[in-house]
Amino acid sequence: MTDPDHRSEARLYLAGFGLALTLTLIPFGLVHWRLMQGRALAITIAVLAVAQIVVHLRYFLHINLSRQKREDLQLILFTVLLLAIMAFGTLWIMGNLATRM
Amino acid sequence: MSTPNLHPGLNLGTRHGAAHEGAETIVFGFWIFLMSDLVIFGLVFASYLTVANPMGMAGGPGPADAFDLRSVFIQTMILLTSSLTFGFATLAMRHEHGRKTIAVWLGASLLLGLGFLVMELRDFAHMIEVGAVPQRSGFWSAFWGLVPLHGLHVTIGCLWIVVMLVQMAVLGLIPVVKTRLLRLGLFWHFLDLIWVAIFSIVYLGGLMP
């Protein structure tokens, strides 16, 4: 069991940087040159943002699902669950109130 | 095949001995802090989204009046590059390339972080000029609660880099300095991750046609 050498690990960082750069350039380009609009653009930006967050987690924060210790993964997933309940709950309730006003 | 990780994030590796073993609980604790910070950011995002509409803007300036897409793009590039340079700093530490190499990459990250802050402060000054101040509307209250909160984190990150540069020079690369640098790296990458959400939701979402 030997650790990968510096060169291959640096290459992984560069790969992550390249992917993140691409996923940044696309939505900025779409908005700057007004290539899309409305709901389709909003969904595209959201999907690209989630993809870029996954790239950051994978290449920069080294979240690797297969080699994690169990409690670390549970911590992250539980936080995301709590956040999803609280954030989507907020948006749901406030959105509902707005339509009733 | 590499050795199994003790904690999420880049590990020091077994050649670092006690520093690597000790990092397991220390870095796990730091992840708990990061996750609580994530909850704070997530809820500030949620409150921003509830007022990011014409009603929330209360007839005041909107995103198109106050945001500058070009400046936000440059800030995004700066922060993304700083994530790469910080990654190289952590790799230099993991592969024992010496204090000088680590300090050079840390210094590059620090300069990029400061550049980001300068650009962001210029944007904020422009917003104040056009009347997009917190007391103008619920929308601007939420904006000023969210984006400067990230900027404050970057400021603290920059201060932390300065502290670590001093500690590296004075104490050398002792185990505690190594694990502090690991945690600072996680913090720095985490801030870049939050920025992805900020430029997507606040800036691109606000300026989209």
Image (cartoon, coloured by chain):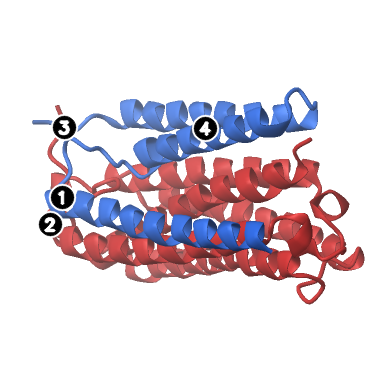
Which residue position holds label 1?
B6
Lateral position of residue B86 relative to residue B177, left or right:
right
Which residue position holds label 2?
B21
Above or below for B30 versus A28? below
Name the chain letter of the residue that bears numbered label 2: B
Q: How many residues crowd mark 1 within 10 Å: few (<14), some (14–19), many (20+)? A: many
Q: Are marks 3 and 1 on the same chain?
A: yes
* Residue B128 % position (x, y): 85, 68
The label on residue B2 is 3
**Residue kind at label 1, given as amino acid type:** Leu
Mark 3 or 1: the one toward you: 1
Query: In the rendered picture, chain A carries what hue?
Result: blue
Mark 4 or 2: the one toward you: 4
Q: Secondary structure at mark 4?
A: helix
For marks 2 and 1, the one nearer the N-term is: 1
Query: In the rendered picture, chain B carries what hue?
Result: red
